[in-house]
Amino acid sequence: MSIYSIILAAGEGKRMKSKTAKPLQKVCGKALMEWVLDATNEAGAERNIAVIGHMAEEVKEFMGDKVEYTYQLQRLGTGHAVMQGIEPIKNEKGTVMILCGDTPLITGETLKKALSDHEEKGRVATVLTSIAPDPFGYGRVIRNGEDVAKIVEQKDATEEEKMVCEINSGMYFFDIEKLNFALSKLDNKNAQGEYYLTDTIEILINAGEKVGAFVVDFDDTLGVNDRVQLAQAEKIMNDRVVKKVMLEGVTVIDPSTTHISADAKIGMDTVLYPGTIIEGKTVIGEDCVIGPNIRITNCVIGDKNEIISSVLVDSTVGNNTSVGPFAYMRPNSKVGDKVKIGDFVEIKNATIDNGTKVAHLTYVGDADVGKNVNFGCGTVVVNYDGKNKHRTTIGDDVFIGCNTNLVSPVKVNDGAFTAAGSTITDEVPENALAIARAKQVNKTGWVKPKDRK
């Protein structure tokens, strides 16, 4: 039996109060709609149709060819949205999942269980429901034994029906042929002037078809309509991600203060201290110590590294290297093995080879640095002339004295030294000592006794 999905993502999302389309708001580094698509793909969907409307071009640009698109130009209710979504597959045979583009917590595992139940029970429609701790505002699912008798909106429910805590999640499985039939019977003769998808359930029941419900975890069904709900979804999803990495052999000292992107990968026996934020497609190897108070974004970190209280973005770190505290590795920085990047050091668009030490208070930008180089405190690679960036090259076994300015473009060859306080503007030969500072002159008696007072 073929499986398809329709993802409803045409809403304006006014409560989000954002210039970004609601389906593209992010939870744990991924757009809400991406999470839903991941779940449908895991559940076996052969085709995914997204119904888009508000900020449609932005959604299409972001999602690309991951989904097919139909448009709901007039937003006339969920039933109307599904009418648009069913068009590309209305002549197919099989089952269609209907989901919302703002429900990132639904999982492929949950959808597979619901689909299995839908097929085993021989239903033409299955409503995914959950037990709400506070069902106010939700549509109530009224059962007739195992089957669904009807779905009642909050405003239309009797006092007895309001006591029911089983609610409609807004997610469904339908036989495509039966859904087409029910959609053809919909009307919008109601206070809102909209076509309600929930009405298809009553239409199918009245036609003598078998309609049931499958209860899933309440968290799985949470939708995101505003920033408060976005934060709630973020917390739940982050808890899931952190739990997953712990079960894979990572020690997380305080899960409540650790944030990990869903796309990150972390090796066994790595320890994450409180205040660790790992974003994007970061990869961290084994036996590392990360944190406390650190942010790593889209980086590749090797094994046995210690990174403390620092920020690393779009960079690479080898093995057995220490970074921080209070270091900043900006994009396109590549640091090798057994390197020390110390406190208040900034690295930008630079390559630093194995065994080099950049201990403290130093800026290395647009530079290629060799092996076993020692940077004295206060070194600056002067890479910008006010208009263009220039590159510096430093060979192997170089010693850079404290408070050296390396004015790019310049080259310091293997084994060379620079004297403390020098401003280097010309190439330094191999094994040479470069001194570029004024000769010291002492004026004896220059300070008069009365000046001391």
Image (tube, grey):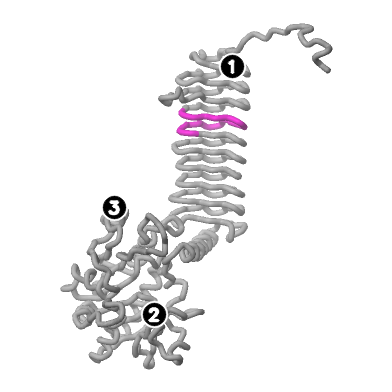
The quadrant the C terminus occupies is: top right
Relative to the observer, which residue lies in front, 224 or 406?
A: 224
Residue at (46%, 80%) from the top-left corner?
A: 136
369 left or right, relative to 182: right
The spot of residue 426 in percent (x, y) is 49, 13
- Residue flagged by tag 1: what amino acid is it? Ser
Residue 383 lies, with reference to residue 338, above or below; the image says: above
* Residue labelled with disc 3: 61
**Secondary structure mostly taken by the magenta-highlighted segment of the chain:** strand
- Select label 1 or label 3 by which is in front: 3
* Residue labelled with disc 1: 422
Residue at (39%, 88%) from the top-left corner?
A: 142
445 left or right, relative to 167: right
Relative to the observer, which residue lies in front, 289 or 345?
A: 345
- Among the two numbered marks 2 and 3 on one chain, the one whose residue lies closer to the N terminus: 3
The spot of residue 294 in percent (x, y) is 57, 47
Q: Secondary structure at mark 2?
A: strand
| Mark 2 surroundings within 10 Å by alpha-carbon count, few (fewer than 14), some (14 through 19), many (20 or more) | many
Residue 352 counted in the magenta span: yes
Marks 2 and 1, how far apart at CA = 73 Å
The spot of residue 178 in percent (x, y) is 22, 81
Residue 344 counted in the magenta span: no
Q: Which residues are magenta?
A: 348-366
- Select label 2 or label 1 by which is in front: 2
* Residue labelled with disc 2: 168
Q: Secondary structure at mark 3?
A: helix
Q: Quadrant of residue 201?
A: bottom left
